[in-house]
Amino acid sequence: MRITKHEHACLRLELEGKLLLIDPGGFTLPLEGLHGLAAVVITHEHPDHWTPEHLERIRRYSADVPVYGPAGVAAAGADVIVVAPGDTVTAGPFTMTFHGGTHNVIHETIPVVDNVGVLVNDEFYYPGDSYALPKHADIRMLAAPVGAPWLKIGDAMDFVLAAKPRRAFPTHDMTLSRIGLDMHRARLAWATAQGGGEFVALEPGESVEL
């Protein structure tokens, strides 16, 4: 499986000539080369994780592509197949299970929305905007949030320590300065190494093979 990090929280997975796209949001540049698209996953309703404009462009490549997301995404106006924690779906070579259920708290005055983490083929995991983890999963590759209004770097380190991934890379990073990004990457690299894992600092457009 080939995993490409786009800007902020958008991820592209490629396997057997098919694509899985996760969280094409407002901080992500327009996506191209989406032929062979098997599915799209939107983890939650916030606009840095999906926009109507991105979905419209995506459906120009594949009008009938299934788009999966929690109930809050459907309520926000996205045309999605609603999924919830515990659900499993298959699209092409990708089998996805969904975990968690709620977005991390930003502030007590801001409503908590639905959020699902997605485990792909029992080996790649992305939690969306949460620290939810699949139970008993052997995570070969973790996409770990590194910067957000809801994120404290110590909590993000604890998340990586708990996940014990074989490999990890940082995502959800457009709210950070270059200096802040490098500092937070170093913390997550330390946490990954504690479980014997390898940390890969991907820039937008860069890929890693799983």
Image (tube, rainbow, N blue to C red):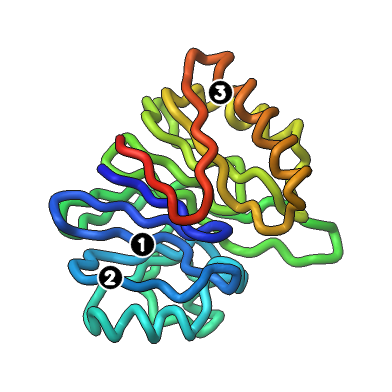
> Which of the numbered marks, if any, corresponds to residue 173?
none
Give me the residue at 54% from left, 57% from top: 9
**Mark 3 vs mark 1, CA separation in Å:** 25 Å
Looking at marks 3 and 2 on the same chain, the residue that comes earlier in the sequence is marked by 2
Q: Position of residue 138 (x, y in %)?
A: 37, 25
Give me the residue at 70% from left, 38% from top: 182
Q: Position of residue 86 (x, y in %)?
A: 38, 48
Looking at marks 3 and 1 on the same chain, the residue that comes earlier in the sequence is marked by 1
- On screen, residue 92 above or below 132: below
Q: Position of residue 11 (x, y in %)?
A: 43, 56
Q: Quadrant of residue 179?
A: top right
> Which of the numbered marks, if any, corresponds to residue 34?
2
- Residue 85 visible? The answer is no
140 with respect to 54 (left or right): left
> Which of the numbered marks, if any, corresponds to residue 21?
1
Determine which residue is flagged by label 3.
Answer: 192
